[in-house]
């Protein structure tokens, strides 16, 4: 019997024509020394202030209300040339956008900061078909963060969402990671300033990788639930079918995925470990994942003290039909957490 192709590999093939439209990345490999020898706090700073937050009501439906939040990002690039480029003019990535979906009757319940995946645009289908369903099923308020170069933070010249997030311009890619982490921590500060109700964290795919990373940097999160993701950036570049263009461009600059991973080792990324207890971490994983290797995720699970984990017999892209089950696990997990 013929074996059906893995959906992950098919996705990699389907995005190739789109990635032909990508902008030509700069070779910034010789500038990565700017990040070496820095402390964890220098690389990933705590937000030093509360920004001025603006809100706007978007819609209200029976049982729901929705609003936009936006504020100026506190991000300050480290690498001098990129810092100059970043501040040379006003850029769309300098504004943090988030969307709040609040079901009626959730006052006093935990809240959820959610980060979406790579190349994921902001769509009405996602808002109503996924986030609203998750919010109602979990009976929680969800605040959905848009990472740089996605959604309303996508440059007008970019042909698709996330086009400039993961590229062979490693300085820009790493600064996008730093900015996502700081923007999420700043949004957490905003949410905790609004209400003492606890805030947990979740995300899917690349958003899951950030959920895992933030569990290692931000103890103020009440819980973290990464979906189908690990934190090994070298392995992600090596494996993910949708990162073929980045691999090709880096090879042109003389770098392999292993050397990309070595950069993260040099800055202490591999030394990160959870700063929230293992019993407040939930992992959802796919056994046949061609984006985030299952063996690497098993290793992370063991290093993290064996938090609760649920495996699905599917690929990365095949995980979507299993979302109802995963959301059910997340609901039981949230409801089972002890609180003062």
Image: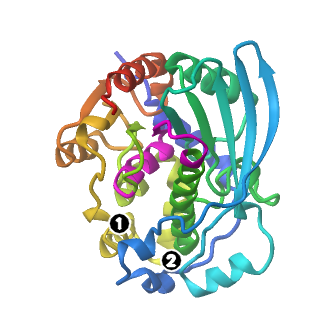
Quadrant for the N terminus in the image: top left
Closer to the camera in the image, 110 or 294: 110
Question: Which image quarter is the C terminus in?
Answer: top left
> Distance between the Cα atoms at labels 2 and 1?
15 Å
Give residue 294's mark. Answer: none
Give yes or no for residue 333 being in the magenta stretch: no
Residue depicted at 29% across the width and 39% down the height: 294
Q: Residues within 10 Å of mark 2 (few under 14, many from 20)?
A: some
Q: Is 236 placed above or below 29 here?
A: above
Q: Residue at x 77, y 81 (%)?
A: 88
Q: Is residue 301 left or right of residue 314?
A: left
Q: Closer to us: mark 2 or mark 1? A: 1
- Helix, strand or loop under label 1: helix
**Residue 300: x percent and y percent?**
24, 47
Residue 41 sits above or below residue 55 on the image: below
- The residue where tag 2 is placed is 253
> Which colour assignment does the render follow?
rainbow
Few, some or many C-alpha atoms within 10 Å of disc 1 (few <14, some 14-19, many ≥20)?
A: some
Above-or-below relation of 46 to 146: below
Q: Secondary structure at mark 2?
A: helix
Q: Where's residue 63, x and y in %?
A: 70, 14
- At a point 81% along the width and 33% down the height, the residue shown is 58
Horizontally, residue 59 falls left or right of residue 111, namely: right
Q: x, y percentage for residue 283?
A: 33, 34
Residue 196 in percent (x, y) is at 51, 40
Q: Which residue position is annotated with label 1?
A: 261
Count of marks placed on residues: 2
Residue span colored magenta: 192-217
Given residues 305 and 68, the one toward you in this image is 68
Mark nearer the N terminus (2 vs 1): 2
Residue visible at 47% across and 41% down in the picture: 205
Check residue 214 for magenta coloring: yes
């Amino acid at each position: 019997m013929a074996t059906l192709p893995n959906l992950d590999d098919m996705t990699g093939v389907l995005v190739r024509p789109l990635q032909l439209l990508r902008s030509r990345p700069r070779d910034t490999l010789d500038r990565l020394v700017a990040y070496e020898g820095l402390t964890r706090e220098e690389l990933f700073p705590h937000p030093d202030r509360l920004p001025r937050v603006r809100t706007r009501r978007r819609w209200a439906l029976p049982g729901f209300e929705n609003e936009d939040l936006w504020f100026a990002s506190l991000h300050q690039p480290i690498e001098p040339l990129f810092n100059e480029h970043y501040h040379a003019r006003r850029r769309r990535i300098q504004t943090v956008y988030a969307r709040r979906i609040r079901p009626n009757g959730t006052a006093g319940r935990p809240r959820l900061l959610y980060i979406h995946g790579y190349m994921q645009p902001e769509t009405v289908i996602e808002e109503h078909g996924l986030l609203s369903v998750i919010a109602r099923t979990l009976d929680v308020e969800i605040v959905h963060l848009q990472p740089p170069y996605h959604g309303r933070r996508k440059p007008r010249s970019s042909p698709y969402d996330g086009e400039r997030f993961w590229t062979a311009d490693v300085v820009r890619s790493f600064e996008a990671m730093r900015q996502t982490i700081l923007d999420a921590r700043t949004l957490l500060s905003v949410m905790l300033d609004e209400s003492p109700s606890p805030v947990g964290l979740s995300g899917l795919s690349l958003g899951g990788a950030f959920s895992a990373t933030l569990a290692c940097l931000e103890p103020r999160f009440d819980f973290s639930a990464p979906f189908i993701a690990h934190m090994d950036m070298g392995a992600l570049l090596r494996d993910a079918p949708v990162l073929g263009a980045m691999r090709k461009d880096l090879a042109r600059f003389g770098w392999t995925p292993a050397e990309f991973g070595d950069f993260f080792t040099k800055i202490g990324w591999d030394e990160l470990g959870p700063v929230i207890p293992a019993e407040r971490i939930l992992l959802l994983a796919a056994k046949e994942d061609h984006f985030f290797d299952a063996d690497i995720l098993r290793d992370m699970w063991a290093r993290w003290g064996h938090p609760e984990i649920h495996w699905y017999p599917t690929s990365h892209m095949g995980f979507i039909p299993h979302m109802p089950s995963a959301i059910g696990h997340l609901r039981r997990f949230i409801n089972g957490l002890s609180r003062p």
